[in-house]
Amino acid sequence: MWHIGDIKKYERCDKLMWLSNREPQPFIPYIFYNESIYELSKKRLNITEFLEGNRNDGNDVFFNHQEAYETFINIRFEYESLRVKVPILQRVGNTYIIYFLFSSCSPKEGEAQSFADTIWVLNKLGLTVSNVYAIHLNTDYVRKDELDVTELLKINTHLFNDKNHKGRSIETLIQLFYRDVSLVLKEMNVTFKLENIEKKRTNVCTRRNKCNYFNTCFKIEEKDTSIMNLVSCSKKFALFEQGVHDIKDVDIESIEGTCHQLAQILAARSQELFFDTYAVESFFNSVTYPISYLDFEWETYAFPPYEGMKPYSVLTFQYSLHIEDNDNHLVHKEYLGRQDCREQFIVKLIEDVPSEGTIMCFNVEGAEKLRLKQLAKQFPKYENQLKQIWDRMLDLSIPFSTGLIYDNRMAGTYNLKKLVSIFTDYNYSDLEISHGMDAVRIYRTSDNSTIEQEQVLKELLAYCGMDTYAEYLIYHFIQNKIKELG
C-alpha cells in the first residue's frame, strides 16, 4: 500500500522512498505544533456534525455513510494500492469540496501535485470534486488575549510561489498536474522490488536539510579534506566526477574563489591551521571588558500561544551568561523560565548583563540579536534597554564562517560543538543533553514528563551553560594563537 508521502519521496529520490519503507527513521520536528490544525479548521468552518475517519479505514467507511453526513474529517480512500487521506470533505449536492490543511503560512504551488493525485483517486471511485481550498495560517496575524481562528486561518483558492508571493490558482494547478497516477505506482512497485539502488551524490542529497539517509547511501568515510566539504562551491560534484577528490588538488581559478575556499585549499595543502593573524586581530580590536558570553535557548510555536505573538513566533525560555572581568575571573549567571516567561526573561537579562563591555555570542544575527529584537517588538517599553545589549554584541562565529580561521578537522563546518572539540579539551558528550534539539524536546515534554523536574532543570541548565563556556574557551584559544603567531 502506497501513500501520497511515498510518491513525494519517490519523485525527489527513488532511493529515499526505497529506504524510508525499509528503514523508517524517527522524526523530531523543529517546530512545536501546539494546536491541532484540524480542530481549529473545524471552528473556522463552523463544523459541528461530521464523520471522522480512522487510520485503518477502508473505502466502505465513507460509502456506508455517504448520505448520512455532509462533512467528513480525515476520511480515507484507496485505489490501485494508493491510499489517500482527505482532511475535510464536504458534500454539496452531487459533488464535493475539499479543504487541504496546512500548519504553515504560505503553502507552495508544488503541493498541488498531491491535490491532483488525491482527486485522481476520488474520481476513480466515482466522486466529483467541484472546488478545492487551502486553509493555512495568516502570517500577519497577531494574537490578542484569545486565539481568533477567523483571523488566524485563511481560506484560499490559490497557492504561493517560492518567494511566498501569491501564485497560481489551485484550479489551474490541478489541471496542470492531473495525471494517471497508476503509471507512477507501477514505477514505484518496480523500484521497491530492487535489491539495491546505487546513487551518486548530488545537491538533492543536501538541499535545504541533509537527507536522513545520507550516511546510508554514502558509507565511504570521507576525509576532512574531501572536495565535498568545499564550502559554497557549485562545481564540487563536477570536479569529483573529473577525479578531483581532495581540496588540496583544487585549482582556485576553476571555482568561485572565495576567501573561505582559499583558506580551505591552503590548509589542505599545508596540513596546518590557516590563521589570518592580522584580520583576526583586527576583528577583535574593539573587545572591551567585562566580556559577557551569552547564549539563548528557544522554542518555535506554529500557533501563537500567547498575546502579542504571531504564527511561528519564538519564545526564548533560557539564557546562560558567563561574565569575564579584567583579571580573567569568570562568573556564571543563568535563567530558565516556563510558560509565558517573556517579560520575566527580559527583566532578568537586563539585570544580569553588565551595562558595559563586549557581549560575545555565536551566530549573533540569526540567534541572540534576532531574539532580542523580536522581544523588543512584543514589549516596546524595554526596547531601549534591549538595544543597549544587542548593540554591544560581537559574533564569535565570523572568523570561522569567513575563513579567517580554518582547520582541516572542521570539514567545511564551524558549529560551536565542533570548534570546541577541535581547539580545546572540552566536549559536549559528557552532558545528558548534548544537542540543541535535545534541549527543545526536553523543554516541550518537561511539564508532563515523569522525569523529576529538578533533574530536567539541571540538564537544561548544564547544556546552555556549556555553550557560553565554550564561547569563552574559543575566544581565549584565538587570543592565545594571536600571541603565539604575533
Image (cartoon, rainbow, N blue to C red):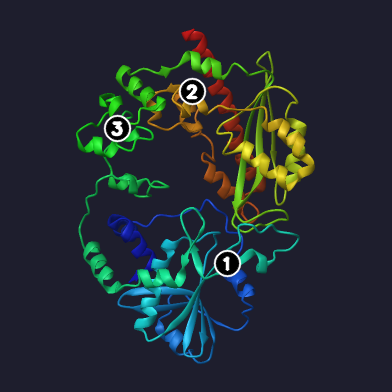
Q: Which of marks 2 and 1 is in front?
A: 1
Q: Residue 425 carries which label?
A: 2
Q: Is residue 229 left or right of residue 468?
A: left
Q: Residue at x 48, y 83 (%)?
A: 96
Location of the N terminus (image quadrant): bottom left
Alpha carbons under labels 2 and 3: distance apart: 28 Å
Q: Where is residue 188 in the image (x, y as percent from the top left)?
A: 26, 65
Q: Which mark is residue 295?
A: none
Q: Does label 2 or label 3 sit earlier along the sequence?
A: 3
Vertical placement of 199 versus 14: above or below? above
**Residue under circle 3?**
227
Q: Mark 2 packing: few (<14 Cα in 10 Å), some, or many (20+)? A: few
Q: Is residue 144 visible?
A: yes
Label 2: which secondary element: loop
Which residue is the extreme one toward the top?
486
Three-letter residue code for mark 1? Ile
Q: Which of 255 and 121 is in front in this view?
A: 255
